[in-house]
Image: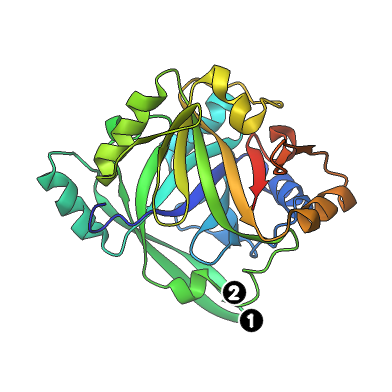
């Protein structure tokens, strides 16, 4: 793996109605952070885990601060739009990719205010866009946290559904091995067969790719949102107790499918265009 790209930092679900997204994900049992407002004009809520997190990113009407996200939302509605890689040094990652013959974007800094128990603080980040040719199906960037103590706040890493972290993301593609090889080259990690698809293993969450006809093996094809291929379609979350998760979903009136292996699958209709699977 590259020296300055260290696995998945977070995933971004882009939505047009942030209030509805909050309602949906709270019903799934996530304990979301208070609303944050980015300096570029968007707003978000996050579900924080031990080493990674889920971001619900709301775009206001006429938003122009991140054209890739605006195009994603316009083309297919809400969904899993972006993958953020963890980096300890965005500038170092930029140099590392240039040496490898790749063309990353420019390093950019941004921030958002955070209310810490009535005290105003600022969460500051440095990001680096990955080469689009190297990341088919998802806007991918590296994220360096200057203020992790502000992003990971006490009290927000515990979730009623028992989620402890991201387990895997699933890319649906007509050419899954080829597309995943692009990510493998970017990250300098091997691609290996995995069931009916292919997988890259990283610290924390894995990245899996399958053909459309084989996505049922992972997501049972329940209510997939129509979107051009390739695209990220599934988030698998790791939990400690599936019975506890099932109870939370049932109490909230969220329908789910129990897979043959006991994992729990929620339709994209309940998760802003994303198939959500809870796994041990």
Return the x and y of residue 144 as percentages of the image width and height.
35, 62
Q: Which residue is mark 1?
A: 118
The crowding category of the residue bearing disc 2, from other C-alpha atoms within 10 Å (few below 14, some 14 to 19, many at least 20), is few
Q: Quadrant of residue 207?
A: top left
Mark 1 touches mark 2? (CB < 8 Å): yes
Q: Quadrant of residue 64?
A: top left
Determine the residue positioned at 87% across, 48% down.
250
Label 1 to label 2, Cα distance in Å?
6 Å
Label 1: element kind: loop
Q: Is residue 74 left or right of residue 206?
A: right
Q: Which residue is mark 2?
A: 115
Q: Is residue 175 visible?
A: yes
Determine the residue positioned at 30% across, 64% down.
88
Q: Is residue 60 visible?
A: no
Pick the front one: 15 or 27: 27
Determine the residue positioned at 75% across, 56% down.
29
The crowding category of the residue bearing disc 1, from other C-alpha atoms within 10 Å (few below 14, some 14 to 19, many at least 20), is few
Using the image, determine if residue 140 lies above or below residue 163: above
Using the image, determine if residue 196 lies above or below residue 8: above
Pick the front one: 63 or 93: 93
């Amino acid at each position: 793996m590259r020296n300055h790209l260290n696995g998945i930092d977070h995933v971004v679900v882009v939505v047009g109605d942030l209030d509805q997204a909050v309602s949906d994900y709270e019903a799934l049992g996530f304990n979301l952070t208070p609303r944050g407002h980015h300096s570029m004009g968007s707003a978000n809520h996050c579900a924080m885990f031990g080493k990674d997190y889920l971001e619900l990113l709301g775009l206001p009407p006429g938003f122009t601060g991140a054209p890739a996200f605006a195009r994603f939302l316009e083309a297919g509605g809400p969904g899993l739009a972006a993958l953020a890689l963890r980096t300890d040094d965005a500038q170092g990652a930029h140099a590392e990719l240039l040496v490898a013959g790749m063309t990353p974007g420019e390093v950019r800094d941004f921030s958002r205010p955070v209310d810490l128990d009535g005290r105003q603080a600022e969460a500051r980040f440095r990001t680096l866009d990955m080469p689009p040719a190297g990341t088919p199906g998802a806007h991918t960037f590296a994220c360096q946290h200057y203020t992790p103590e502000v992003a990971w706040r006490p009290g927000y890493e515990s979730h009623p559904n028992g989620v402890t972290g991201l387990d895997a993301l699933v890319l649906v593609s007509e050419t899954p091995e080829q597309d995943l090889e692009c990510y493998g080259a970017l990250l300098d990690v091997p691609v290996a067969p995995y069931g009916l698809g292919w997988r890259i293993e990283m610290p924390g969450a894995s990245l899996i790719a399958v053909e459309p006809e084989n996505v049922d093996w992972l997501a049972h094809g329940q209510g997939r949102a129509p979107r051009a291929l390739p695209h990220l379609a599934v988030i698998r979350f790791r939990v400690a107790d599936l019975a506890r998760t099932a109870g939370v979903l049932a109490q909230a009136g969220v329908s789910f499918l129990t897979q043959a292996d006991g994992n729990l699958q929620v339709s994209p209709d309940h998760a802003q265009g994303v198939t959500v699977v809870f796994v041990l």
